[in-house]
Image (cartoon, helix red, strand yellow):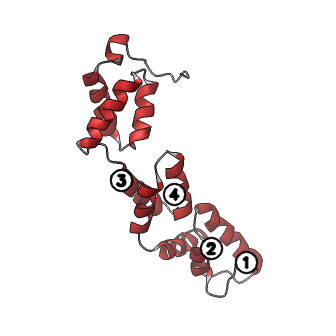
Amino acid sequence: MRPTGRKQVDAAKACDTRAVRSAAIALLARRDFASIALIRRLESYGYDSAVVGGAIAELAAERIVDDARFCENYVAYHANRGQGPARIGADLKAMGLSSELIDPALAASPGWRARAQAVRSRRFGPELPQSWPERSRQARFLQYRGFSADHIRAALGTDFNLDD
C-alpha cells in the first residue's frame, strides 16, 4: 500500500463486515462512487479485500451502490461542465467501468451537437470563426473537450471540414 496520509483501520476492524459496510456507507453519504472505486478506497484504508468485496456486493444487491446510476450521474455532470462524450467515456473506462454501462449512459444524454455549440460559443463568443486558423483553433479546443468530428462540424458551421 502507498502512504496516503489517511488513518489506517486497526486489525480487528479490518475484517469486520459491519465496519466495512458502515465505512462504505459513510463514503457514499458524501458522494456517489462506482463499485470499483469504492473497493479501492476501502482497501486503501486497510480493510481486508475479501470482506470489502462481499460488503460491496451486498450494497450493490440493495442498489445502494449502482454502477449504472453512477455512470448516468457522471455523464450528466461532466456534460453540463462542457465535456464531450469521447472524453467522458474515456474517463469512465479509466475508472474500470465496462462499455455495457458507459455506452447507454452516453446515449441517454441528448444533444451532443447542441452542447458542442454551446461550449464553443461560451468560450469564443457567438460569432462563427471566419479564418481557417481560428476555425482550427476552435476545433482543437472542442476535440480536447471530447467532442467528435461530427459535433465539431455542427458547432463550427456546415462548411467546415476537419479532413482538409
Q: Which mark is first along the chain, 2 or 1?
A: 2
Q: Which mark is first along the chain, 3 or 4?
A: 3
Q: Are marks 1 and 2 in contact (CB under 8 Å)?
A: yes
Helix, strand or loop at mark 2: helix
State the image coordinates of residue 106 (x, y, percent, origin top left).
44, 64
State the image coordinates of residue 117 (x, y, percent, origin top left).
54, 75
Does residue 133 appear in this view?
yes
Work out whether residue 42 or residue 103 is closer to the camera in this orientation and state it: 103
Where residue 163 is drawn, which disc sits there? Answer: 1
State the image coordinates of residue 13 (x, y, percent, origin top left).
32, 16
Q: Amino acid at mark 4?
A: Gly
Q: 103 above or below 134?
A: above
Q: Amino acid at mark 3?
A: Ala
Distance, label 4 to label 3, CA atoms, is 13 Å
Q: Which mark is first along the chain, 2 or 3?
A: 3
Q: Quadrant of residue 105?
A: bottom left
Work out whether residue 33 or residue 125 is closer to the camera in this orientation and state it: 33
Crowding near the residue tagged with mark 1, few <14, some 14–19, many ≥20 C-alpha atoms within 10 Å: few
Q: Residue at x 62, y 87 (%)?
A: 158
